[in-house]
Amino acid sequence: PPVENREYLSFWHCVSGIFKNKYLWIDQIATLLDALGNGMLDMKTVLLIYTWRETGLIFSLCEILYKISGNPGEFLAPWIRKRFQFKQLIIFKYIVCAIRNGVYILAILFLGNTHILCGVAIYIAMFLSNILESAVGLSQSDNNIRVTDYQMYISGERFEAYQGVVGWFTGPLSALISLIIPLMFYRVGFTSDWDVLFIADVRVKCMIIGLAFDMAGYLLMSLPYMFFWDYTDEKHAFIMEELKKRAESFEEDDNNQTYSSEITENSVISSASTE
């Protein structure tokens, strides 16, 4: 509605409307579970700098190749999104990430004695995973808009500025969970001195610990979407049609009200002229 016709909504009214949006809660729970991987080492950095000891041309080429590996997935993302539901894509992404971490761990355990072969296996898994993950990135951005559309449907307002209040409850838990990996790193000898990663024994332990917790996080993140997410494309189409009807009805009522006001005003003017 026009600004002059909007009514004031209290803070707690907006917050209560946000709390009714179950899809925001599902997203926030997944974000909370993702905290299991917070603090892990960047595999690309550990591989190139601390395992292969590369900082020159090979390092630059590997970085560039990895960055452009996501381009095919991003290019095909609109086509993929039209053919698959968001639920399928997000679960697929988390399963791919978990499998990728599993490949990392297997490569470290069984190929760790040959740094080059182990690194090649890890880099290939990293490269392929980035291609697949990038194809899902667009669907996540699109889903954020659809969740806001659902908020409009149930509350009559989008409440975009208040969506972060769900994090009031998960934020403290996320901070605590994020301490798990750093504490485990401390126990195996990794501190603020990153040079200890040049020691193979410390590096391998840190990599496996981080990857194991991160893999568990990805598997757990898929569960809320697998069992509770029912926001399909068909449901979103119904919601948008309903919102369109509401907008048309509101516009019609507004026009009728304006027309009635004009008639009343003309009647008053006519009476005054007659007198």
Image (tube, rainbow, N blue to C red):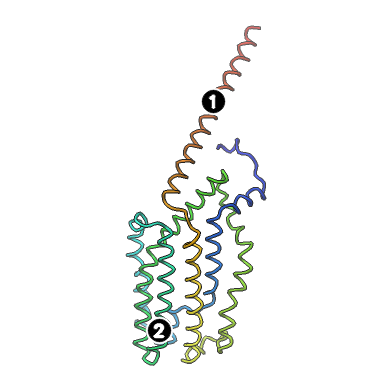
Name the disc covering residue 265, or none. Answer: none
Task: Point out residue 47 in the picture as x, y percentages from the top left corner.
Answer: 41, 83
The C terminus sits in image quarter: top right
Say which of marks 2 and 1 sits in front.
2
Q: Residue 119's quadrant in the figure?
A: bottom left
Compared to residue 101, the image places residue 173 above or below, namely above
- Give the amino acid type for the residue marked by disc 1 in the picture: Asn
Q: How crowded is mark 1: few (under 14 residues within 10 Å), some or many (20 or more)?
A: few
x and y percentages locating residue 228 in the rendered image:
50, 59
Labels 2 and 1 touching (C-beta < 8 A): no
User: Element at badge 1?
Assistant: helix
Please identify the residue farthest to the top as the structure is shown. Answer: 274
Report the side of 264 relative to 240 (left or right). Answer: right
Q: In this view, does 239 lie to the left or right of 159?
A: left
Q: Residue at x 43, y 84 (%)?
A: 49
| Whole-percent x, y for residue 266 in the image | 58, 16
**Is residue 143 positioned above or below 155 on the image?**
below
The residue to which callout 1 is attached is: 256
- Residue identified by numbered label 2: 106
Residue lying furthest front: 227
Residue lying at 51% horizontally and 77% vertically, measured from the top left: 213
Q: Which amino acid does label 2 sit on?
A: Leu
- In this view, the residue in front, 45 or 89, is 89
Which quadrant of the figure contains the N terminus?
Answer: top right
User: Looking at the picture, does residue 17 appear above or below residue 252?
Assistant: below
In the image, 37 versus 120, the foreground residue is: 37
Task: Name the spot of residue 96 as percent of width and height, x first.
Answer: 40, 71
Q: Which of marks 2 and 1 is nearer the N terminus?
A: 2
